[in-house]
Image: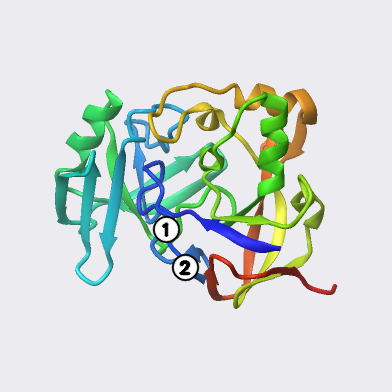
Amino acid sequence: MRVTRLSVTPIKGLALHHPDSVDVRRTGVVGDRLFYLVDDRDALVSIAKTGGLVGLSAEFDVATDRLTIHEDGQVVAQAEAAPAEGHSADFFAFRKVPGRLVPGPWDEVFSDRARRRLRLVRARDLDGAHDVEPLTLLGEESVRRLAEVAGTGVDSRRFRMLIEFDGASAHAEDGWQGQRLQVGTLVAEVGGPVQRCAGTTRNPDTGEVDLRTLALIGDYRGRQESVFGLGFNFGVYATVVNEGRVAVGDSLELLPA
């Protein structure tokens, strides 16, 4: 098995970047999902709630603390992302994520696109705005199986998974829970399934709802248990055992118990 794609973004919910390699620490990839957006109820706002953010991409320079937002290749906001007032965000009623509000031009840019008032928050941890666990894994054959059911191609970017890989049968990753996995110099322990939300129904380029992803998964997998209860699972979580670097092309190997 080998890594085929890596997907990260400085701001949760914005367009993904696909680097050749990433450095993984205890809380995940350095700089990945360092920022996130919340509404007036201090609840996380994801692309499940609005597709208006999909066309935006972010770059964050750790050395200068400078955040840049692009749209259609043009810079629409750029400034130092200095956090200020303390904040606690509600992530899916599952956990509270500590952070700090980030003043600047961001709120206007994001609120205009989402057509609702949003605020930018910087997570307390360097890479701490993950949903359940800091790592996610998805096999290419799992995506191909879904495409067979759908009768059309399925872009795996819909699932926004950190590590995609080939060389395993469809949904083989579901059977790895509790096992350790070596990927590059990283050692991870595979966790439970990722329950999917309506964000996967949105086209990763346009933000439009154009595929009945959840219904299709349900058609052949049914509803399955996860940390959120019964739902539509696709891909798995993982935690970091030993920090390391992962690159596209690295082997992915299950370690002996």
- Residue at the image point whose x is 47% and y is 64% from the top: 29
Q: Residue 32 carries which label?
A: 1
Q: Which of marks 2 and 1 is in front?
A: 2
Horizontal side, residue 187 vs residue 69: left or right: right
Contact flag, marks 2 and 1 (Cβ < 8 Å)? yes
Which of the 4 quarters of the picture holds residue 55?
A: top left
Amino acid type, label 2? Val
Task: Specify few, some or many for label 1: CA neighbours under 10 Å numbering under 14, 14-19, or 20 or more.
Answer: many
- Residue at the image point whose x is 67% and y is 24% from the top: 151
Which of the 4 quarters of the picture holds residue 99?
A: bottom left
- Residue at the image point whose x is 78% and y is 56% from the top: 177
Front residue (pair 67, 85): 67
- Residue at the image point whose x is 51% and y is 69% from the top: 24
Front residue (pair 68, 211): 211
Looking at marks 2 and 1 on the same chain, the residue that comes earlier in the sequence is marked by: 2
Name the quarter where the N terminus is drawn. Answer: bottom right
Name the quarter where the C terminus is drawn. Answer: bottom right
Amino acid type, label 1? Asp
Which of the 4 quarters of the picture holds residue 167?
A: bottom right
Residue 66 position, x and y percent, is 20, 61
Rendering colour mode: rainbow
| Disc 2: which residue | 22
Residue 44 position, x and y percent, is 42, 38
Whether residue 6 is visible to the viewer of this picture, yes or no, is: yes
In the rendered image, the vertical position of residue 130 relative to residue 40, given as above or below? below
